[in-house]
Image: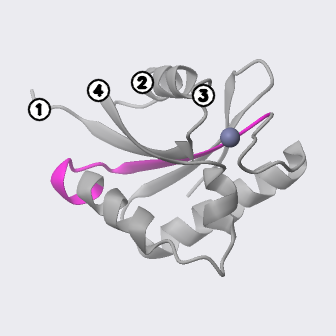
Amino acid sequence: MTNRFAVCLNCMDGRVHLPVIQWIKENYEVDYVDLITEPGMDGVLADLNLDIKNIVTKLEISVDKHGSQYIFIGGHYDCLGHPVDNETHKKDVMVAVERIKKLKGSCKIIGLWISEKFSVKKIIEM
Ligand SMILES: [Zn+2]
């Protein structure tokens, strides 16, 4: 059986990775999760004035070479890289999902929220 990959665009914050990887593996048919991180990733992707070419180049390695069909985008509680309130985070995750969907239309794009208990919740899938 070949390995099934997904890719997650998330904050660099070390508290989020294990919960997110575990949640993805429990909820999708995925063996491995490629990670692309930036401080406050949801804020970076939601800022439409920011050039995200560098991030997209990394994303394409996972999609093209690992065959990732699912792209997850995370925002989390107590984010130092993007210090906004929880509602703004969730809105930014939605904007980020829409932005990436326009670039990678054949993939499923899933927006995740990681709460103060570091539990993972799906906000949107498109
Ligand atoms: Zn963060």
| Sequence-first tag of 3 and 1 | 1
| Sequence-first tag of 4 and 2 | 2
The residue to which callout 4 is attached is 31
Q: Is mark 3 within 8 Å of ligand 1?
A: yes
Within the displayed image, which quadrant is ligand 1 positioned in? top right
Kind of residue at badge 2: Lys
- As helix, strand or loop, the secondary structure at mark 2 comes to helix
The quarter of the displayed image where residue 53 is located: bottom left
Which residue is pictured at 86% across the width and 43% down the height? 86
Magenta-tinted stretch: 63-77
**As displayed, is residue 72 above or below residue 117?**
below
- The reply to whether discs 4 and 2 touch (Cβ–Cβ < 8 Å) is yes
The answer to whether 59 appears left or right of 42 in the picture is left
Query: 48 or 26, which is in the foreground?
Result: 48
Mark 2 or mark 3: which is in front?
3
Question: Could you tell me how far apart the alpha carbons at marks 4 and 1 are, in whole angstroms?
Answer: 9 Å
Q: Residues within 10 Å of mark 2 (few under 14, many from 20)?
A: some
Kind of residue at badge 1: Thr
Magenta stretch containing residue 70, yes or no? Answer: yes
- As helix, strand or loop, the secondary structure at mark 3 comes to loop
Question: Could you tell me how far apart the alpha carbons at marks 3 and 4 are, in whole angstroms?
Answer: 18 Å
- The reply to whether discs 2 and 1 touch (Cβ–Cβ < 8 Å) is no
Q: Residues within 10 Å of mark 4 (few under 14, many from 20)?
A: some
Q: Position of residue 51 (x, y in %)?
A: 53, 78
Magenta stretch containing residue 86, yes or no? Answer: no
**As displayed, is residue 102 above or below residue 89?**
below
**Split into 4 quadrants, where in the image is the N terminus?**
top left
Mark 3 or mark 4: which is in front?
3
Question: Could you tell me how far apart the alpha carbons at marks 2 and 3 are, in whole angstroms?
Answer: 14 Å
The residue to which callout 1 is attached is 2
